[in-house]
């Protein structure tokens, strides 16, 4: 789904960026242009970022427990 219409950024692209190391909104803004124009996508982009980080934490815990 498109999160940032101004820069045609999808939730998948945000997740990929987080998995590649983007941990803050400023990282997403620099790498993808999220929330750099009108800013209406900032809340949704931030939520996708947080969800992706939580997914990484779950995967990391699961790997260390195995």
Image (cartoon, rainbow, N blue to C red):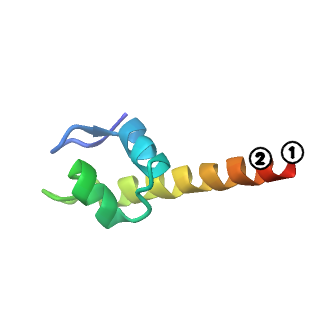
Residue topped by disc 1: 66
> Image quadrant for the N terminus?
top left
Residue 54 location in percent, x, y?
61, 55
Look at the numbered disc 1 and give the secondary structure of its residue. Answer: loop
* Residue located farthest toward the top when viewing the structure as drawn: 1
Q: What residue is at 15 percent from the left and 45 percent from the top? A: 6
For the residues labelled 2 and 1, the Cα–Cα distance comes to: 5 Å
Viewer-nearest residue: 64 or 59: 64
Residue 53 location in percent, x, y?
55, 56
Look at the numbered disc 2 and give the secondary structure of its residue. Answer: helix
Residue 53 seen from this side: yes
Residue 11 location in percent, x, y?
40, 40
Determine contact: label 2, label 1, CB under 8 Å.
yes
The disc placed on residue 44 is: none
Q: What residue is at 31 percent from the left and 56 percent from the top? A: 28
Q: Is 23 left, or right, of 26 in this rendering?
A: right
Quadrant in which residue 46 is drawn = bottom left
Q: Is 41 left, or right, of 53 in this rendering?
A: left
Judge the density around disc 1: few (<14), some (14-19), many (≥20) Cα neighbours within 10 Å: few
Viewer-nearest residue: 62 or 25: 62
> Image quadrant for the C terminus?
top right
Judge the density around disc 2: few (<14), some (14-19), many (≥20) Cα neighbours within 10 Å: few
Q: What residue is at 17 percent from the left and 43 percent from the top? A: 7
Residue 64 location in percent, x, y?
80, 52
Q: Is 65 left, or right, of 38 in this rendering?
A: right
Residue topped by disc 2: 63
Viewer-nearest residue: 60 or 8: 60
Q: What residue is at 61 percent from the left and 51 percent from the top? A: 56
Looking at the image, residue 10 lies above or below residue 41:
above
């Amino acid at each position: 789904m498109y999160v940032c219409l101004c820069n045609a950024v999808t939730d998948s692209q945000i997740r990929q960026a987080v998995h590649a190391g983007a941990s803050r909104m400023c990282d997403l803004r620099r790498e993808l242009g999220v929330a750099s124009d009108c800013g209406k996508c900032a809340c949704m982009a931030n939520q996708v970022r947080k969800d992706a980080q939580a997914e990484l934490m779950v995967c990391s815990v699961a790997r260390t427990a195995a």
